[in-house]
Image (cartoon, rainbow, N blue to C red):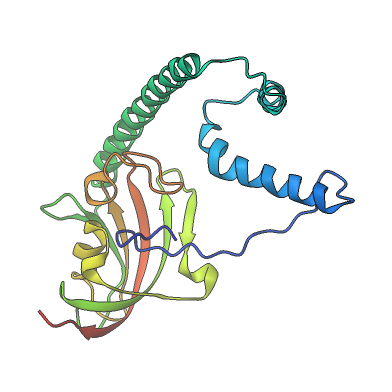
Amino acid sequence: MLIALALPLAMTAQEKKYKPSAKLKTLKDSVSYAIGIDVYQNLTKSMDEFGINWDVFVSAIKDVSKDKPGYTSEQMQTVFNSYQNEMQRLYNEKTDKNLEEGRKFLEENKKNKSVFVTESGLQYKINKEGTGKSPSMNSTVKCHYTGKLIDGTKFDSSYDRNQPLTLPLNQLIKGWSEGLQLMKEGANYTFYIPNELAYGQQQAGIIPPGAVIVFDVELIEVVEEQKK
């Protein structure tokens, strides 16, 4: 779940099923394969951007299994410190790139006569105006949406799941909370959300740090008002 009480998304797509690349003849084989999946998903997947030499990775496991690790604890700590420094450098580099691309996108986008800009910096376009009631910050709303990066990459869609999002406005990112209060039931708007009204300089699932995000949002219903 990408929402974490902040993102108006619920990534609940079913896992794809594939056949193991290895021949699993025994329970030992199956357990070994399952452990390999677990190790990759929980320990090494985050290192993909940096890269892993898989031959060396496997040789280290074999060395440890023979009680002959080639590094002392002190050597390992030195390596991990260097790795953390390099990953921080790459993260900062990526963030700076996204911030600059987002700034240029918003500067160009606001030149469009159909795009409005609020005091906070939220940009929005009215695709279809609604006729129902508008939500307040204390409202729970039901919406359909599609979320994309500025390069057009789709990262989530309630339409694809055929399941509208129903959540209180005060649990959504700032760009959504503000934008929805501009809408009436039945409306369809596009929000162009600066990083400071979304996730700032933090990675959020596949949404990169410092990114501007774009949502097509349909306000289906103001479900209820919460007690203040």
On the rendered structure, is 179 left or right of 39? left
On the rendered structure, is 121 left or right of 92? left
Q: Give the quadrant of residue 10.
A: bottom left
Give the position of the N terminus as an image quadrant.
bottom left
On the rendered structure, is 160 left or right of 124? right
Report whether residue 115 is seen.
Answer: no
Q: Give the quadrant of residue 227.
A: bottom left
Give the position of the C terminus as an image quadrant.
bottom left
Q: Residue at horizontal 53%, vertical 15%?
A: 72
172, above or below 152, in the image: below
Report whether residue 108 is seen.
Answer: yes
In depth, the one of 209 and 56 nearer the eye is 56
Residue 103 percent location from the top left of the image: 26, 36
Residue 12 percent location from the top left of the image: 52, 65
In depth, the one of 66 and 148 nearer the eye is 66
In depth, the one of 50 and 132 nearer the eye is 50
Residue 14 percent location from the top left of the image: 61, 64
Q: Residue at horizontal 24%, vertical 47%?
A: 110
Q: How many marks?
A: 0
166, above or below 9, in the image: below
Residue 17 percent location from the top left of the image: 72, 58
Q: Residue at horizontal 48%, vertical 62%?
A: 11
Q: Residue at horizontal 46%, vertical 15%?
A: 74
